[in-house]
């Protein structure tokens, strides 16, 4: 079965809803305001994932029985996981297993990789990690037919953008970036990771303002949850590496995608610089568009060790 047939077969019985941002607005009405918007957990990776979900209200807050779940890691490059340029397979597996235990119908791990997709999935360890897990599907999305064009309301850098059909056709999306430096945007965290769901990266990098485009993309692709992998952070030579890697043994999970990125910015020095979130252009642009919170003093967040 080819990937196009797989997507059509997988979702032939799925009711197609509105874009993820619309689903989020509906879910926000039922959200518990007493829960933190983000939880940073330091320690053993698998225990950290469990604890993060516990702090955010439990896996059942996000995933219901029968849901089709999209996990969007950063798998852009065919590098070993030790480089820190891709999301740790162990973190992805821990989330996938929790989703299945919560009753998910299937879990799709997808990314429009920067290099040949299967090679990227193989070399970072994903293929081996998920071998034999029948309900988890690894899907490099590298054909234009996997994407659909949507309008970006009030967009300036982006009037429209082709995004992965999976965003609309799955019930739950969890963004799973890694924490790394970036030559063009200072850092690559959750908001930057959404570029793995677009077709034309060249337009973002060379034909519009990159920092504005990333922020505007975050207004139309809004995951229900972001889980940032900072277990090993690539502090220099990002996004590709190899560079300096620091074992931070931390994940940051939250329903506010901007707050997650802001917290991550303070975890380390990036490209040998201490960065304030207010100095990272795509974060301040996203704040101006109402994507999330920039001042963590005004955010209900927690930081714990396990």
Image: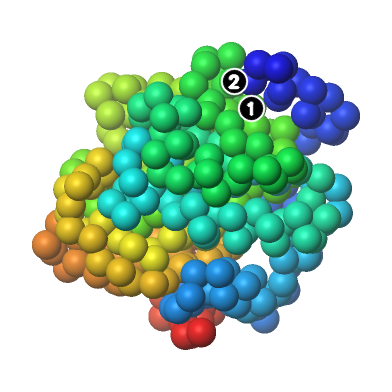
How packed mark 1 is, by other alpha carbons closer than 10 Å (few <14, some 14-19, many 20 or more), is some
Q: How many discs mark residues in the rendered view?
A: 2
Taking the spot 32% from the left edge, 22% from the top edge, the residue there is: 202
Judging by the rendered image, the residue that carries numbered circle 2 is: 146
How far across and how far down the image is residue 8, in percent? 75, 21
Mark 1 or 2, nearer chain start: 2
Taking the spot 35% from the left edge, 57% from the top edge, the residue there is: 179
Judging by the rendered image, the residue that carries numbered circle 1 is: 165
Secondary structure under tag 2 reads: helix
Q: Residue furthest left?
A: 272
Image marks 1 and 2: residues in contact by CB distance under 8 Å: yes
Taking the spot 52% from the left edge, 59% from the top edge, the residue there is: 91
Taking the spot 74% from the left edge, 43% from the top edge, the residue there is: 135
Secondary structure under tag 1 reads: loop
Location of residue 212 (image quadrant): top left
How far across and how far down the image is residue 163, in percent? 54, 28
What is the basis of the colouring in this image? Answer: rainbow
């Amino acid at each position: 079965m080819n990937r196009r047939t797989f997507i059509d077969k997988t979702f032939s019985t799925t009711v197609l809803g509105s874009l993820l941002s619309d689903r989020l607005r509906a879910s926000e009405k039922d959200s518990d305001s007493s829960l933190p918007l983000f939880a940073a957990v330091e320690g053993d990776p698998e225990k950290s994932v469990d604890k993060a979900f516990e702090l955010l209200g439990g896996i059942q807050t996000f995933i219901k029985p029968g849901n089709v779940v999209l996990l969007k890691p950063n798998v852009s490059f065919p590098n070993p996981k030790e480089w820190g340029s891709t999301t740790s397979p162990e973190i992805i597996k821990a989330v996938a297993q929790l989703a299945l235990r919560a009753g998910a119908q299937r879990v799709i791990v997808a990314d429009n990789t920067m290099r040949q997709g299967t090679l990227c999935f193989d070399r970072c360890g994903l293929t081996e990690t998920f071998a034999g897990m029948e309900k988890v599907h690894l899907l490099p999305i590298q054909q234009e037919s996997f994407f659909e064009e949507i309008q970006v309301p009030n967009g300036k850098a982006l009037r429209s953008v082709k995004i992965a059909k999976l965003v609309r056709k799955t019930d739950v999306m969890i963004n799973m970036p890694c924490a790394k430096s970036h030559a063009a945007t200072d850092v690559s965290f959750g908001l930057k990771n959404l570029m793995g769901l677009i077709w034309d990266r060249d337009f973002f990098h060379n034909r519009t303002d990159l920092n504005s485009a990333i922020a505007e993309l975050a207004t139309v692709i809004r995951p229900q949850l972001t889980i940032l992998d900072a277990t090993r952070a690539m502090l220099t030579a990002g996004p590709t590496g190899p560079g300096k890697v620091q074992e931070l043994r931390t994940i940051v999970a939250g329903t506010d995608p901007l707050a997650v990125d802001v917290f991550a910015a303070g975890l380390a020095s990036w490209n040998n610089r201490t960065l304030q979130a207010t100095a990272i252009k795509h974060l301040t642009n996203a704040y101006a568009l109402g994507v999330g919170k920039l001042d963590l003093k005004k955010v209900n967040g927690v930081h714990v060790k396990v």
